[in-house]
Every structure is written in structure tokens, then in C-alpha cells.
Image (cartoon, helix red, strand yellow):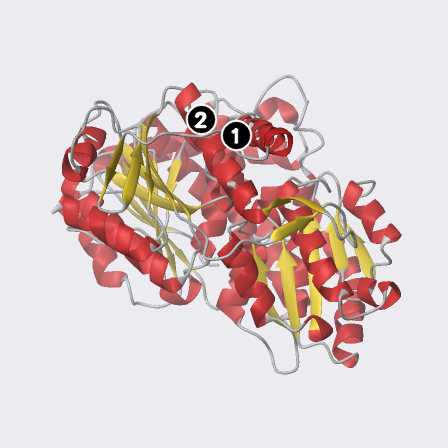
């Protein structure tokens, strides 16, 4: 990666220079490398044991052969596909690698499952032949409910074809030593268990087993990727400058970090989004990452915007030039080839750690993530005891849509106007608990475009429950300036979650789990005083989203 190039108004340039001087005077980067937890706070809790990512470019070199051995073995056994089962930090880097690099000839066609919506589960189940698939359950804690539910479901699908001994050979776990998943891998006879450095937090784990096993599965050159990461460790200036850029934005109230990414690298934005949102959104502070936002006239962006341009070609040059000409700060990060993502990941990790310093928070915990999980677990417990989730009555039913939290509104346009008119808000978050199909994504992007053009507020789009493990922390931990539009839909068909891998009994389905997660997240937002509106789209999400778009015109 080349040195960053910045275009910004004079006042921002001055603030950026001052931020850089502060970093230098207080030896912030040197202290991070020295594992000095006092960069962020005096208490080392969840800091001293979360800095293992600084060693990833070095220590993972000795692990490359372990990955190659597994991948070569399953290829020799006739496997053609892999399905990574994970959430958040365990799934985002693999998804980036698959989208950016594709699949080398003769390697495994990797897919990622990070949705509990039954339609998403069944789509993967129908598309894959278990006989030729390596399943990769990945979770740091070893107890992530989504990952273990995926694992039990696909274990049973595979066990319906093979003996117990053979079934386990279709699975390889990625987890931390001593976790529940490690025990399960041993009990079920998994082909392998990759044991990650426990001192690496999930969202900082792209260059550990959590990212590299998937990279090896699709045939990436792992040594080359790690060489690029090592170059960032040896030459950290781009990461330090990026950190100072974020620090200047914090100082000047430009906390809406809008990502502009060359199309061939577009998938990287979701990884950056999680890293920044979950690391900085706490203690009523936060930097809102804005990924894949539709374009608008550059003059309509608010004074709270900050732009980072991840560039590998000139596709977005004209748009970026217009944004800079309109007086918004832009930092350009140039990549020479896709393998520069190794350096890019490391630079962003350094910059995010530095942003935590400027915000006076520490970037390695996630105190508000648990709130939605607890509420979802409570609802699941109610279901297991009573046989149904608590009944909810909509405030308004119109045109096949059911609205919750719309108050006294008597029409869809009125409900949306009331929602968008809530005072003192700075961004709109679309939280879509529907499958992330191309058609649904396109419809939601059209809705996002309308909201952006109508309000000029920053907009984000997250698919549930995956965003609970990324932007969910910021939604509940920042200064409460978001408007949250939750969208849910009926499943075409439900899928059972086995009580245990290999068990024929089931007490709950993915449909129930998905509903409980959506309701738990919404209640967690309400409990924190956030402005929310839930719209249930019925059985045809695209048509429901189109109705919302029509109501905004």
C-alpha cells in the first residue's frame, strides 16, 4: 500500500496535523506495539489479552502448512465446496476473500452462512452436496448460538447420508483453545480443529485462522498475503495517518465515516464496518461507518461526513473528486493489487486502535452486544415453556404491512414522516431481518437512496442477525443519534434446530430463533431510548419494501 493521499479543507488539514503531532509526542503507536494498555486506560482488563493481532503477520507463517495440509487432504478426497458457519469476526474476512479473489482452479468453492433466517439456511442446504462439502464452524467463544445451531443442522444433514465416523470428517472447527466447540469437535470426530491464539479478538482476527483457513480453501497464496501484512507492521505510517484522520474527524464532529471502495474490493467495506463500529461505539461515543451507500450530489452531504477512499482502479475517481471539491475531507488509500488487503487489514486495525485513543475509550470490548442476546434468550425461554413467542399487536396494518411503534399514525406515509421527523438525529439504520438475496439487497438500496435524498442523513444497511455482531454495539453504545427502521418478513418454510448434533429431537426452529433475535434487538434499542419503527413485510419482502419506497415519494 502506498502512502495515503489527503484532500481536505484547511481547517481539517490543521487538525489532522495536530492529531499526528499528538500521536508522535505521546508515542501512541510505539506504546501499542509495546502492548501498553495505558494508551486507552489504566485497567488492563480486556486489553492486555486482546493484542495478539499485532503478532498475526509473524506467528501465522508457522501455521500455513497446517492449513494447507487440511485443504489438500479434502481436495484429494473429492471435496469441491466449503461452507463457513460463523458470525461477525468469524465470517466477514472469509466473505471478503471469497468475493475479492474468487476460487482458484481445483480449490473449494467457499460460501458463508451468517443468517438465521430459515430461507437463508434452506438455500444453502439445497445448494450443497454434503458428500463434497467441508463445513467450517467458526466461533472464538465456542458457544455462539448461531454458529452452533448451523453446526447441528448441517451435521444432521450429513449424518443422514454417512456413518458417524464419516460424518465428522466433513467438519473442521476454528475456535479458541478450551472452548465448547473444541470439545464438540473431539466428541464428534471432526477431521481437524484449528486452535486460534486466544489473545486475538474476533473483529481483529482476519489474519489469524479465522480468516486464513477460508483463504486457503479458495486457493489464495497465504504467504503472499502474510508478506503484505508484515509490510504494514514494518511500515505502519499509512495506519498511523489513517488513525490521525479519524482523530481529526472526531475533533471536528465528522464522525460519519463514509467508505468509498473500488468495485472489485467492495466486499472489504463490511469488514471495516464491523471493526470500526464494534470497536468505537461505546460510552456514548462512536464513529459510524457508512458502507455501500448509494451516491447523491456531493453538496448534499452533511458537515458530519468523513470519507476514506479504498482505491485499486479509477472507477470512482470522478465521484471522489466531486466530494473533495464540495469541501469534505477525503483520505485515499491506494492498493496495487488485491493481496494488499493483507496490509490494509493491519493498517485499519492500527487506525481503529488509535481512534479509541482519541475517543478516550478502549476498542477491544463490546459491552452492549450482550443486551440483545439476553433479551433474545429470554424470548426463546418463553417459547420453550409456552410453545409460542409473546403475542405482539401492531399499531397499524395497511396494504399487507404491519407497523409496530407507529403511534397514532393512520397511514404509511404519515407513519414514515413521524419516524423521520424525530428531532436531533444524525443517521438512519435499516435493520433487515430478511435473507440477503440480490433482489432484497437491491430493493433495500432503493429504499436507502430515497431516505438519503429525502433527509440527507447518513444511512446504513445491515442484515440481521449478522449486524448484531458488528454495528449492533454502536447502535446501543453511541450517543443515541440513530433512527432505527427494522424490517422483518415471513419465511417461506421453516427449518428445525436439532437439540444436539446427531439428535432427532428439536425444541425450536430457525424461524423462532430469528424472530427472537429481531425482537430482542428492537427491545434493547427501545430500552436505551432509541427511536424505532418496525415494519413487518409479510411473505413478499420485495413488494413490502416497494410500498415503503412509494410512501416516501
Q: Nearer the viewer, residue 529 or 261?
A: 529
**Whether residue 324 is visible:** no
- Residue 325 place in picture, x, y as percent: 17, 49
Q: Please tell me which residue is depicted at 82% across the width and 48% down the height of the picture.
A: 184
**SS of the residue under disc 1:** helix
User: Vertical placement of 174 versus 358: above or below?
Assistant: below
Q: Residue furthest left?
A: 553
- Residue 337 place in picture, x, y as percent: 48, 68
Q: Is residue 196 left or right of residue 289?
A: right
Residue on which disc 1 sits: 372
Neighbour tally class for label 2: few under 14, some 14-19, many 20 plus, Cα within 10 Å: some
User: Vertical placement of 111 versus 377: above or below?
Assistant: below
Q: Please tell me which residue is depicted at 64% across the width and 37% down the height of the picture.
A: 33
- Residue 44 place in picture, x, y as percent: 68, 22
Q: Is residue 469 left or right of residue 440?
A: right
User: Vertical placement of 91 versus 12: above or below?
Assistant: below
Q: Nearer the viewer, residue 1 or 266?
A: 266
Neighbour tally class for label 1: few under 14, some 14-19, many 20 plus, Cα within 10 Å: many
Q: CA distance from mark 1 to mark 2?
A: 8 Å
Q: Earlier in the sequence, mark 1 or mark 2?
A: 1
**SS of the residue under disc 2:** helix
User: Which image quarter: residue 242?
Assistant: top left
User: Which image quarter: residue 12?
Assistant: top left
Q: Is residue 533 left or right of residue 378?
A: left
Q: Which mark is residue 523?
A: 2
Q: Please tell me which residue is depicted at 75% across the width and 55% down the height of the picture.
A: 173
Mark 1 vs 2: CB contact within 8 A: yes
Amino acid at each position: 500500500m502506498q502512502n495515503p493521499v489527503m484532500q481536505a479543507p484547511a481547517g481539517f488539514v490543521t487538525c489532522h496535523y495536530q492529531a499526528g503531532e499528538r500521536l508522535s509526542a505521546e508515542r501512541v503507536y510505539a506504546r501499542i506495539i509495546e502492548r501498553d494498555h495505558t494508551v486507552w486506560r489504566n485497567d488492563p482488563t480486556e486489553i492486555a489479552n486482546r493484542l495478539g493481532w499485532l503478532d498475526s503477520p509473524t506467528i501465522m507463517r508457522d501455521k500455513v502448512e497446517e492449513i494447507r495440509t487440511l485443504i489438500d487432504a479434502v481436495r484429494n478426497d473429492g471435496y469441491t465446496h466449503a461452507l463457513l458457519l460463523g458470525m461477525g469476526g468469524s465470517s466477514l474476512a472469509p466473505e471478503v476473500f471469497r468475493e475479492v479473489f474468487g476460487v482458484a482452479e481445483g480449490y473449494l468453492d467457499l460460501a458463508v452462512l451468517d443468517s438465521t433466517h430459515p430461507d437463508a439456511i434452506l438455500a444453502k442446504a439445497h445448494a450443497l452436496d454434503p458428500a463434497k462439502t467441508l463445513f467450517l464452524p467458526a466461533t472464538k467463544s465456542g458457544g455462539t448460538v448461531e454458529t452452533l445451531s448451523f453446526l447441528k443442522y448441517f451435521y444432521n444433514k450429513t449424518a443422514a447420508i454417512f456413518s458417524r465416523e464419516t460424518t465428522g470428517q466433513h467438519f473442521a472447527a476454528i475456535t479458541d483453545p478450551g472452548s465448547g466447540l473444541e470439545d464438540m469437535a473431539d466428541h464428534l470426530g471432526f477431521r481437524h480443529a484449528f486452535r486460534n491464539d486466544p489473545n486475538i479478538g474476533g473483529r481483529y482476527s482476519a489474519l489469524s485462522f479465522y480468516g486464513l483457513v477460508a483463504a486457503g480453501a479458495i486457493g489464495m497464496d497465504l504467504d503472499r498475503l502474510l508478506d503484505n501484512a508484515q509490510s504494514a507492521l514494518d511500515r505502519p505510517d499509512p495506519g498511523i495517518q489513517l488513525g490521525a484522520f479519524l482523530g481529526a474527524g472526531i475533533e471536528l464532529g465528522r464522525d460519519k465515516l463514509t467508505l468509498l471502495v473500488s468495485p472489485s474490493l467492495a466486499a472489504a467495506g463490511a469488514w471495516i464496518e464491523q471493526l470500526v463500529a464494534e470497536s468505537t461505539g461505546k460510552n456514548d461515543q462512536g464513529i459510524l461507518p457508512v458502507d455501500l451507500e448509494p451516491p447523491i450530489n456531493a453538496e448534499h452531504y452533511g458537515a458530519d461526513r468523513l470519507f476514506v477512499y479504498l482505491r485499486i482502479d479509477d472507477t470512482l475517481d470522478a465521484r471522489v473528486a466531486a466530494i473533495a471539491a464540495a469541501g469534505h475531507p477525503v483520505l485515499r488509500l491506494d492498493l496495487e493489487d488485491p493481496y494488499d488487503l493483507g496490509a490494509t487489514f493491519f493498517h485499519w486495525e492500527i487506525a481503529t486502535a488509535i481512534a479509541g485513543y482519541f475517543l478516550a475509550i478502549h476498542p477491544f470490548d463490546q459491552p452492549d452486544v450482550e443486551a440483545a442476546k439476553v433479551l433474545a434468550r429470554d424470548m426463546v425461554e418463553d417459547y420453550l415453556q409456552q410453545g409460542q413467542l409473546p403475542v405482539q399487536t401492531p399499531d397499524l396494518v395497511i396494504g399487507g404491512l404491519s407497523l409496530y411503534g407507529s403511534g397514532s399514525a393512520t397511514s404509511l406515509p404519515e407513519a414514515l414522516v413521524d419516524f423521520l421527523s424525530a428531532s436531533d438525529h444524525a443517521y438512519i439504520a435499516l435493520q433487515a431481518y430478511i435473507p440477503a438475496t440480490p433482489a432484497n439487497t437491491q430493493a433495500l438500496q432503493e429504499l436507502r437512496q430515497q431516505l438519503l435524498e429525502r433527509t440527507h442523513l447518513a444511512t446504513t444497511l445491515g442484515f440481521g442477525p449478522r449486524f448484531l455482531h458488528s454495528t449492533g454495539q454502536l447502535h446501543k453504545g453511541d450517543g443515541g443519534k440513530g433512527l432505527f427502521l427494522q424490517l422483518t418478513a415471513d419465511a417461506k418454510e421453516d427449518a428445525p434446530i436439532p437439540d444436539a448434533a446427531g439428535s432427532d429431537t428439536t425444541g425450536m426452529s430457525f424461524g423462532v430463533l430469528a424472530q427472537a433475535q429481531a425482537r430482542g434487538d428492537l427491545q434493547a434499542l427501545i430500552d436505551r431510548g432509541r427511536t424505532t419503527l418496525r415494519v413487518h413485510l409479510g411473505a413478499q419482502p420485495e413488494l413490502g419494501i416497494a410500498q415503503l419506497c412509494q410512501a416516501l415519494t
